[in-house]
Amino acid sequence: IITEKEVVAMEKQPANSVASQLVISDDVIASVAMNAAKDINGVGKIVQRPKDIRSVVEIFEGALKYVEVSSNEKTYTLKIHITIKDGEKIPVVAAEVQKAVKNAVQGMTGCVVSKVNVCVADVEITEKRT
């Protein structure tokens, strides 16, 4: 499995050579991560990641608006932004999201996930407290 960055090297191969490697885009990895996180009890929504210097230079579309994907030659690091439903224990939900995202991405893509950072952006208050 190779990253998008390695595609450039593959494109420089002679036309008659056969590439036997699989390319999985960062957007696909982000989509898998989002779907895994949505299934966790206590997660309200997956929210758009805050703007940073990288987002000024690059235009993120699709799942990459919500999940930051970075990689080196062998592993991926993911950062996902979520809201938590009212009454849920943040550390418990965040740990479940980490586990589910890591297992889903590794299971579906074969890519090694070294770290899943969960950022809790907000708590969804559903009823008024008295």
Image (cartoon, rainbow, N blue to C red):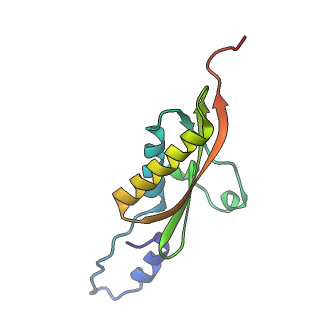
Where is residue 63? Give x, y as percent.
50, 49
Q: Position of residue 100 (x, y in %)?
A: 44, 48
Would residue 64 be seen by someone viewing this image from the given angle?
Answer: yes
Q: Nearer the viewer, residue 106 or 34?
A: 106
Q: Position of residue 122 (x, y in %)?
A: 67, 35
Q: Residue at x 51, y 50 (%)?
A: 98
Q: Residue at x 68, y 48 (%)?
A: 50
Q: Quadrant of the N terminus?
A: bottom left
- On screen, residue 2 above or below 32: below
In the picture, measured across the screen, residue 73 lies left or right of residue 123, that is: left
Q: Quadrant of residue 84?
A: top right
User: In the image, what residue occupies the spot 41% across and 54% down?
Assistant: 103
Residue at image coords 35%, 57%: 107
Give the mark count: 0
Q: Taking 89 as reference, is 78 above or below it?
A: below
Q: Is 124 on the left-hand or right-hand side of 4? A: right
Considering the image in quadrants, where does the C terminus appear? Answer: top right
The answer to whether residue 62 is seen in the rendering is: no
Q: Is residue 66 above or below residue 74?
A: above
Q: Position of residue 6 (x, y in %)?
A: 46, 77
Say left or right for 84 vs 30.
Answer: right
